């Protein structure tokens, strides 16, 4: 079968992940007419202003920083020294290193995530609901903790894995060494695999199996069907996830600084970190220039993605009733079950087991009976700062994730389902924060908020953190919801409008109602993104508004890794709870789960 | 008692007659500062000492004694500096006291981020080793030594001199703070360079030390037996790893150190509370909190009161420290030697 769903159709509009899918001009005109006279321009203007404030404003501050010999507020001159300084052989090597590491980890993670998502969403593998929760766990654990756990498991000299290997084989050889390119990639994969998995698993669920059945009826093999129909229909979601994950890989810091720096593996973020924090005189011009160079590269990727998906339709959720069926694997289902368990064991059981164990011992990694203790739990329980930070973080997490999903949902609607003027700009603005490495963007927020007129009470309050979190989370929210919107047929919207529903009613009762599993995933992603965010938080928090990531940093730097483990475990419990509730809700809608 | 001449007696008597009212006047002046500080009721501290239980204890003691609430902003040195800089550039004068290492403080003084602290009675307590001026007040000292794994290093092999780590038997077995980055590594680089010359580092580079920037994790890695030797070890971390099979050592030549300093930020909203806080910080009782925690106190006569094992580490020769004016040149040299 020639991938019928991907045929260029005469009525196809311009679906475009960067620029947004569209609607037929006639539809757009009809909608235009139905909206209140000034409603749409006012709404678009408001949206543009909001996004400009959240993302363009800090970017402009950073651009100034990259073009000026001194940071804002200090006399200096405009020049291109920051950019000129990038053109060295060493920086080109760093760039190649960064791209190589990120590409390899994204490709491997993508393959693994698609396999796992297919197993969970489309097969009769046992305990799929539980597996789904377990597979996503690594994403939510602070990277600093898993890095510590892996440093203990996989170091060449006394790592648990190598000790076990030597004991089993009776040799002195080393099986794994996390201080290597492989170690950096492996540690990154533990975050990118569940991240991509979260994106694609719902897309698998939202697929009408009739298309696959048609392919099989037309004589295609199972593999051909998977490749030409299943995979091809998921291109918007998979390419979005790929690009997001690749960009995040380019911006990854913890894995590189833990496992790369000791063996002289340098990447863009470690270089930026050096420029800002590891020199007597922080080089903000160099760091921001590096940030913009990385951003330009990432922008090219987005253009590439938009060309890849241009003028294709990915509609799978139509007015026709359907139920995503599952493939009966027979005996093979135990093989797929084993694959999921192996992933869980390698990425969750080992490091979290290490964390759990360590939280009951006086010292991380020293398991002697006389060192058993509950002191770390007591210390966290008695830590006032922790409770204040937890309260602030929960408040910011819930309001931030909700606000971000609302904003992301609106942006995604405008960019994927309308031809409104300004939609491309809206989409671009929503993307910007994702393309700038976090530690540079944090400075942009600091500069931006601190230099606002004093009458605007943002700087030094929780608002500063909330706005930064919304800006940082919006790209994920937009990607998650636009991927889901693109799978929903337009006739459903039209049907709603024909029956007299208003624009907001249609948005809420058709689009959001059908895409809400994606909203729920997006909410969880943004919520835990907020819980983990440090780069902006450390610069924007004020006494009394500290958040969990800052408190964890304080604990970490004051040598209390065990207390950080306790908080890490608390976060794991929260994830389990959130995901359990989320999947219970999905189950009420999709009976085959 | 040695008899004194009439002239000397008269001179002393005159001095006493002048000094006595002057001291009384000083006391009265200081009492005004204390009263004004209490009236201000609040103090905002910007510190690069992140998560320190010792600093927290001192802050709580100050709050308890004077009823002045302290709000502390803790971040890494460069983050504290940038936050102060942009706030002042934007006309937001939020912070009162700045607490940071000597390099960041020197840069900020150069940039005009501080104001003079004025007379503070307890400045007289300061150890003359550490310089004080009208803006920067020494607060406590981060000192460095070596850390060995007791299971991997026999007593006879323990380094007694910093030069001992150049012995070929340690090649590839030393875990080291990165000498090319700010922090313990760069302090170690500068002090060894100034003491033993460039050759020390050429030989140390040939030892192939394993650089790491996970400072908090390095001690545990050494304790677990990944490496027998960790260079340089921050003595104030010792309390956190007591009970592990490790031993801190300060070699014969002494300990490299970094001075932490207190300064009053420009246009501080609570200047009297800031002065009172500096005075309180320099009281021997508060300095003892730091000495017990493995910091060298900035005040005379305190190390002697520290617990014996800590005293053995702290009552050692201050070997040298970084020089802010030469920091960039030194880091460039480090990058050249340790490529």
Image (cartoon, coloured by chain):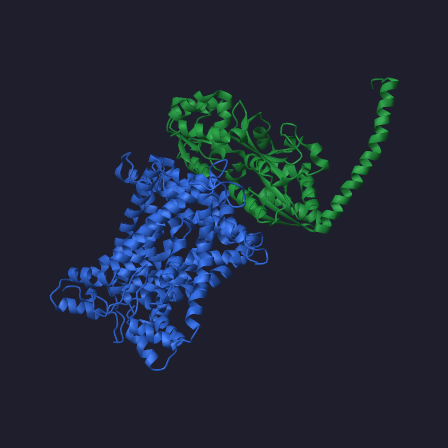
Q: Which chain is blue?
A: A
The tally of labels here is 0
> x, y (%) of residue A320?
25, 76
Query: In this picture, is B79 found above or below B4?
Result: below
Which quadrant of the structure image shows residue A422? Answer: bottom left
Q: Is residue B6 left or right of residue B210?
A: right
| Residue at the far bottom in the pictured view | A499
Q: Where in the figure is residue A411, as x and y percent of width and height?
A: 39, 64
One can see residue A328 in this view: no
Q: Position of residue B102 (x, y in %)?
A: 57, 34
- Judged from this view, the residue extending furthest toward the front is A78
Q: Quadrant of the N terminus of chain B?
A: top right
Q: Colour of chain B?
A: green
- Is B61 situated left or right of A343 in this image? right
Residue in the foreground of this view, choosing between A224 and A364: A224
Residue at 44% of width from left, 73% of height from top? A38
The residue that appears at 31% across and 47% down in the rendered structure is A102
């Amino acid at each position: 079968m020639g991938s019928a769903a991907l045929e260029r159709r005469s009525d196809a509009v311009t679906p475009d992940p960067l620029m947004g899918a569209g609607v037929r001009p006639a539809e757009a005109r009809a909608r235009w007419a139905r909206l209140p006279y000034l409603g749409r321009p006012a709404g678009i203007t408001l949206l543009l202003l909001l996004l400009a404030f959240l993302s363009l404003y800090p970017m402009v501050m950073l651009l100034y920083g990259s073009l000026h010999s001194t940071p804002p507020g200090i006399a200096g001159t405009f020049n291109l020294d920051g950019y000129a300084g990038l053109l060295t052989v060493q920086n080109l090597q760093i760039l190649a290193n960064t791209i190589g590491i990120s590409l390899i980890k994204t490709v491997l993670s993508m393959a693994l995530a698609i396999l796992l998502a297919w197993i969970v969403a489309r097969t009769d593998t046992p305990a799929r609901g539980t597996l789904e929760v377990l597979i996503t766990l690594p994403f939510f654990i602070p990277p600093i903790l898993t890095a510590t756990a892996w440093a203990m498991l996989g170091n060449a000299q006394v790592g648990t894995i190598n000790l076990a290997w030597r004991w089993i084989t009776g040799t002195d050889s080393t099986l794994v060494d996390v201080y290597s390119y492989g170690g950096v990639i492996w540690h990154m994969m533990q975050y990118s695999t569940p991240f991509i998995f979260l994106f694609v698993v719902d897309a698998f669920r939202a697929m009408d199996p009739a298309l696959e059945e048609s392919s099989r009826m037309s004589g295609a093999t199972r593999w051909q069907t998977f490749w030409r129909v299943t995979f091809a229909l998921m291109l918007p979601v998979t390419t979005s996830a790929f690009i997001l994950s690749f960009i995040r890989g380019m911006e990854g810091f913890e894995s590189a600084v833990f496992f790369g720096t000791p063996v002289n593996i340098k990447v863009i973020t470690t270089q930026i970190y050096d420029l800002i924090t590891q020199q007597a005189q922080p080089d903000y011009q160099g760091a921001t220039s590096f940030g913009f160079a990385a951003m330009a590269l990432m922008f090219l990727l987005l253009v590439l993605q938009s060309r890849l998906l241009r003028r294709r339709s990915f509609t799978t959720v139509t007015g026709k009733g359907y139920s995503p069926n599952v493939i009966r694997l027979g005996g093979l289902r135990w093989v797929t079950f084993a694959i999921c368990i192996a992933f869980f064991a390698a990425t969750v059981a080992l490091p979290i087991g290490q964390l759990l164990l360590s939280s009951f011992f006086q010292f991380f990694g020293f398991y002697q009976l006389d060192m058993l203790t509950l002191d770390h739990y007591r210390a966290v329980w008695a830590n006032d700062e922790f409770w204040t930070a937890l309260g602030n973080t929960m408040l910011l997490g819930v309001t931030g994730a909700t606000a971000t999903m609302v904003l992301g949902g609106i942006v995604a609607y405008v960019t994927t389902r309308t031809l409104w003027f300004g939609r491309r700009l809206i989409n671009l603005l929503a993307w910007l924060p994702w393309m700038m490495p976090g530690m540079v963007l944090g400075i942009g927020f600091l500069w931006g908020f601190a230099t606002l007129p004093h009458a605007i009470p943002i700087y030094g309050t929780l608002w500063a953190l909330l706005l930064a979190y919304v800006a940082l989370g919006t790209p994920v929210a937009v990607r998650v919801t636009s991927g889901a919107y693109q799978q929903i047929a337009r006739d459903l919207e039209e049907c709603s409008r024909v029956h007299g529903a208003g624009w907001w009613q249609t948005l809420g009762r058709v689009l959001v109602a059908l895409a809400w599993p994606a909203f729920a995933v997006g909410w969880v992603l943004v919520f835990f993104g907020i819980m983990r965010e440090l780069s902006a938080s450390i610069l924007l928090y004020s006494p009394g508004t500290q958040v969990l990531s800052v408190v964890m940093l304080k604990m970490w730097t004051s040598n209390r890794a065990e207390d950080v483990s306790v908080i890490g475990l608390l976060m794991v419990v929260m994830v389990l709870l959130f995901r359990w509730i989320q999947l219970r809700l999905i189950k009420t809608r999709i009976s085959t789960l | 008692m040695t008899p004194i001449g009439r002239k000397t007696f008269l001179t002393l008597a005159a001095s006493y007659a002048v000094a006595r009212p002057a001291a009384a006047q000083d006391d009265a002046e200081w009492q005004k500062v204390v009263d004004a500080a209490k009236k201000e009721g609040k103090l905002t501290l910007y510190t690069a000492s992140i998560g320190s239980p010792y600093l927290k204890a001192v802050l709580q003691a100050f709050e308890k004694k004077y009823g002045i609430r302290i709000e502390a902003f803790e971040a890494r040195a460069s983050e504290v500096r940038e936050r102060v800089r942009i706030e002042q550039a934007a006309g937001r004068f939020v912070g009162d006291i700045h607490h940071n290492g000597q390099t960041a403080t020197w840069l900020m003084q150069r940039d005009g981020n501080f104001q003079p602290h004025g007379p503070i009675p307890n400045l007289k307590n300061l150890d003359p080793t550490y310089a004080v001026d009208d803006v920067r007040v020494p607060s406590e000292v981060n000192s460095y030594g070596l850390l060995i794994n007791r299971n991997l290093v026999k007593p006879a092999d323990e380094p007694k001199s910093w030069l001992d780590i150049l012995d070929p038997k340690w090649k590839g077995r030393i875990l080291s703070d990165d000498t090319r980055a700010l922090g313990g590594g760069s302090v170690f680089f500068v002090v060894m360079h100034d003491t033993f010359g460039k050759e020390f580092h050429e030989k140390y580079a040939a030892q192939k030390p394993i650089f790491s920037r996970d400072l908090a994790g390095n001690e545990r890695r050494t304790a677990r037996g990944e490496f027998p030797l960790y260079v340089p070890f921050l003595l104030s971390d010792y309390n956190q790893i007591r009970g592990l099979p490790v031993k801190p050592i300060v070699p014969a030549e002494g300990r490299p150190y970094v001075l932490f300093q207190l300064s009053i930020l420009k246009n501080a909203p609570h200047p009297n509370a800031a002065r009172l806080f500096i005075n309180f910080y320099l009281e021997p009782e508060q300095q003892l909190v730091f000495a017990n925690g493995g910091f060298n106190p900035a005040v005379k006569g305190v190390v002697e009161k520290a617990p014996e094992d800590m005293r053995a580490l702290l009552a050692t020769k201050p070997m040298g420290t970084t020089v802010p004016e030469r920091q960039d040149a030194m880091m460039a040299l480090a990058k050249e030697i340790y490529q």
